[in-house]
Amino acid sequence: MSDEEDIVLSELNDDELVEQMFDDLYDGLKEEIEEGVNILLERGWAPYDILTKALVGGMTIVGHDFRDGILFVPEVLLAANAMKGGMAILKPLLAETGAPRVGKMVIGTVKGDIHDIGKNLVSMMMEGAGFEVVDIGINNPVENYLEALETEQPDILGMSALLTTTMPYMKVVIDTLVEQGKRDDYIVLVGGAPLNEEFGKAIGADAYCRDAAVAVETAKEFVSRKHNQLAG
Ligand code: B1M
């Protein structure tokens, strides 16, 4: 029997368990991650803390080793799959706040980009804060965004990009909205690891959101501003 198999997750203290979950996420062990999430929930951890401290924390380590050529795509896919297993447990809990509907958002990852964990997390947190979210998935050309905006009539358009090569596509979408005279109909929020505030401004977005919590705060602020303007 290997050392790994000797570890009983429920016997670890919180810090040890989170450390072990970093290792399990790194190794793409979905069932262990799910078990870890459930144990932390039983111990009274807030779903948001589990998400940010255990899951996002673990994925950050994976990201560093991916960058440095220590991990490769197949391993990172397994890690992503394990993370999604944990997120699936937390999703209903984050959405359980019973907050009244505060607004609607269409969100998708841009063309050429298949990263969806960050986008999914933003969707979960937005739903938890009372927003209705229509997720159009990954690799979206401008036509997909236009169609979803037309059909769904949201308050907010959210776009995600994780690659430096795909982030400029956000400008293509915004420029098309401008050309069609629709830009001012929506609050445009953008996010993703390689972006920053300056980039958000340069492409004509309303705001860049550093993480899911900031996305929620920013969305609330812009929607209430919009409603005040309409009322005024
Ligand atoms: Co890719 N990948 N990847 N990858 N991947 C990165 C992004 C990279 C930084 C890794 C690295 O080198 N360190 C690097 C990009 C380098 C660059 O562009 N400068 C990279 C690369 C190079 C690639 C490939 C090209 C690798 C290859 O094939 N050689 C390839 C590209 C595929 C493609 O898209 N066409 C690729 C593939 C993959 C996998 C498929 C293996 C997998 C994705 C699985 C999936 O998503 N289902 C993957 C993963 C998992 C990563 C890393 C390790 C983790 C990304 C992640 O999920 N983070 C990533 C390294 C990293 O970012 N540290 C990496 C966790 C997530 C919660 O954070 O997505 O940043 P994040 O989201 C945050 C915020 O950014 C923000 O809120 C979220 C929650 O707080 N946010 C928004 C995000 N979107 C938002 C939208 C909003 C608001 C806020 O709208 C309102």
Image (cartoon, rainbow, N blue to C red):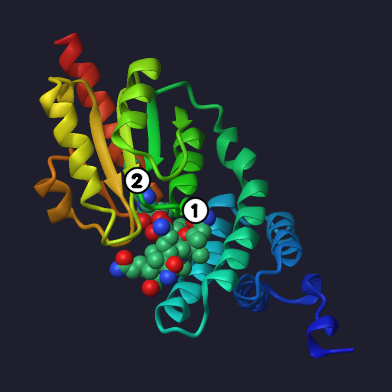
User: Taking 144 as reference, is 203 left or right?
Assistant: left
Secondary structure at numbered mark 1? helix
Say which residue appears at 30% left-offset and 54% top-offset: 210
Amino acid beneath label 2: Lys
Compared with 3, 97 (above or below) is above
Say which residue appears at 27% left-offset and 45% top-offset: 190
Label 1, label 2: how far apart the Cα atoms are: 16 Å
Question: Quick one: 18 or 4, which is closer to the camera?
Answer: 4
Q: Can residue 52 be seen in this view?
A: no
Mark 1 closeness class: few <14, some 14–19, many ≥20 residues within 10 Å? some
Quadrant, the C terminus? top left
Compared with 49, 32 (above or below) is below
Ligand 1 image-quadrant field: bottom left
Disc 1 Cβ-to-ligand 1 distance below 8 Å: yes
Amino acid beneath label 1: Ile
Compared with 116, 69 (above or below) is below
Say which residue appears at 58% left-offset and 59% top-offset: 50
Q: Can residue 47 be seen in this view?
A: yes
Q: Pick out the residue farthest to the right.
A: 1
Say which residue appears at 12% left-offset and 20% top-offset: 181
Image location (x, y in percent) of residue 213: 39, 48
Contact? badges 1 and 2 (CB < 8 Å): no
Image quadrant of residue 102? top left
Image location (x, y in percent) of residue 57: 50, 69
User: Taking 16 as reference, is 76 left or right?
Assistant: left
Image location (x, y in percent) of residue 154: 35, 22
On residue 117, the disc is 1
